[in-house]
């Protein structure tokens, strides 16, 4: 690789930053607390099912 050649780095991710910064009005919005609570409940359910069987 030449020393003068650009390796990408942060310049290659600049488009992704702009893409994820834009908000879509039609997107499904889920509260982060809901995601965490669902994960915890699923974990407890798996533990209970493992204990029972």
Image (cartoon, rainbow, N blue to C red):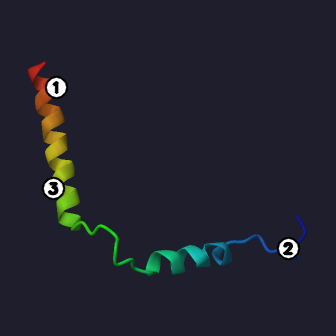
Compared to residue 27, the image places residue 52 above or below, namely above
Q: Which residue is the extreme one toward the front? A: 26
Q: Which mark is residue 37?
A: 3
Q: Residue at x 10, y 31 (%)?
A: 48
Residue designated by label 1: 50
Secondary structure of the residue carrying tag 1 is helix
Q: Residues within 10 Å of mark 2 (few under 14, many from 20)?
A: few
Residue designated by label 2: 5
Secondary structure of the residue carrying tag 3 is helix
Circles 2 and 3, Cβ within 8 Å, touching? The answer is no
Circles 2 and 1, Cβ within 8 Å, touching? The answer is no
* Cα–Cα span, label 1 and label 3: 20 Å
Secondary structure of the residue carrying tag 2 is loop
Q: Quadrant of residue 5?
A: bottom right
Quarter containing the N terminus: bottom right
Q: Residue at x 21, y 68 (%)?
A: 31
In the rendered image, residue 37, in percent from the top left (x then y), is placed at 15, 55
Viewer-side label of 2, 3: 3
* Cα–Cα span, label 2 and label 3: 48 Å
């Amino acid at each position: 690789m030449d020393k003068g050649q650009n390796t990408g780095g942060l310049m290659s991710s600049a488009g992704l930053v702009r893409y994820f910064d834009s908000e879509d009005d039609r997107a499904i919005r889920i509260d982060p607390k809901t995601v965490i609570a669902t994960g915890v409940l699923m974990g407890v359910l798996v533990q209970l099912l493992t204990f029972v069987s």
